Image (cartoon, rainbow, N blue to C red):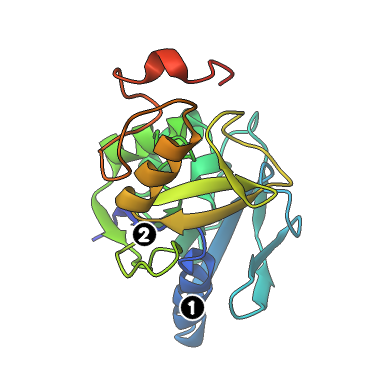
Amino acid sequence: MTKLHVRFGTVDSGKTLRLLSDAYQYQKQGKRPYLIKPTRDTRNKEIVWSRIEQISRPCDLFLHPHEDVPEIPSDVKCIFVDEVQFFTSRQIEQLAVIAQTVPVICYGLRTNFKKKLFPAIITLTALMHEVQFIKSLCSGSGCDRMAMFNMRLHNGVPVFTGDSIETGTHYKGVCDKCYDAAFAASVVGSTVTPSSPLSPESPSIASTVSTDV
């Protein structure tokens, strides 16, 4: 049965490594995989690359935000979508239609560094048939909880304002507790304890947070 599958993971959880491994399994059985990557991911251009294992393969389609998903070759047995959070909602809808005849597996981030869903992920969540979470450990010092969110760093310091898509920055996957502690520490004059369930959208501290979003 063809489906629209989703594999969510945080930064450095091995999402692309999983994609390449899954695509290889199809190829090994003589079934043609078809890899799609968004042009918004400027790293390595038209190459799908895993920095964890340093393996890669060319993508079959390098899709611009203004382009529609084209007709897929008839011999394709499964479509693999890298960095799905960078696609448009319209492109996600088109992939959902394609998934009625050919399996589509999407890999990417669920939320941005502000703990908000990407527009593409909102649409994908509504249309997907199956979801899995690729588990990884929190990058917080001495923390052994599971990573849930993506923290943006500038010169090693967590930041919580800025554009959702920004090149030249560093990210790490962290658990909810470590994210909230870092956010609380970033609020000047805050009396909130690190264990409090805060986010950049928390109404109790909204007046003290920069509105540069």
Q: Position of residue 151 (x, y in %)?
A: 50, 47
- Given the image, on which type of amino acid does mark 2 rest? Ala
Front residue of this view, candidates 177 and 18: 177
Mark 1 to mark 2: distance in Å?
A: 22 Å
Q: Which corner quadrant of the image does residue 213 belong to?
A: top right
Residue under pointer 2: 147
Q: Secondary structure at mark 2?
A: loop
Residue at left 44%, top 44%? Answer: 182
Q: Is 170 positioned to the left or the right of 194 in the image? A: right
The image shows residue 28, relative to residue 54, as above or below, that is below
Q: Position of residue 175 (x, y in %)?
A: 34, 55
- Given the image, on which type of amino acid does mark 1 rest? Ser
- Crowding near the residue tagged with mark 1, few <14, some 14–19, many ≥20 C-alpha atoms within 10 Å: few
Q: Position of residue 70 (x, y in %)?
A: 58, 42
Residue under pointer 1: 21
- Crowding near the residue tagged with mark 2, few <14, some 14–19, many ≥20 C-alpha atoms within 10 Å: many
Point out the residue furthest to the top here. 207
Q: Secondary structure at mark 1?
A: helix
Residue at left 39%, top 70%? Answer: 142
Q: Is residue 28 visible?
A: yes
Front residue of this view, candidates 4 and 159: 159
The image shows residue 127, relative to residue 168, as above or below, that is above
Closer to the camera: disc 1 or disc 2?
2
In the picture, the quarter occupied by the N terminus is: bottom left
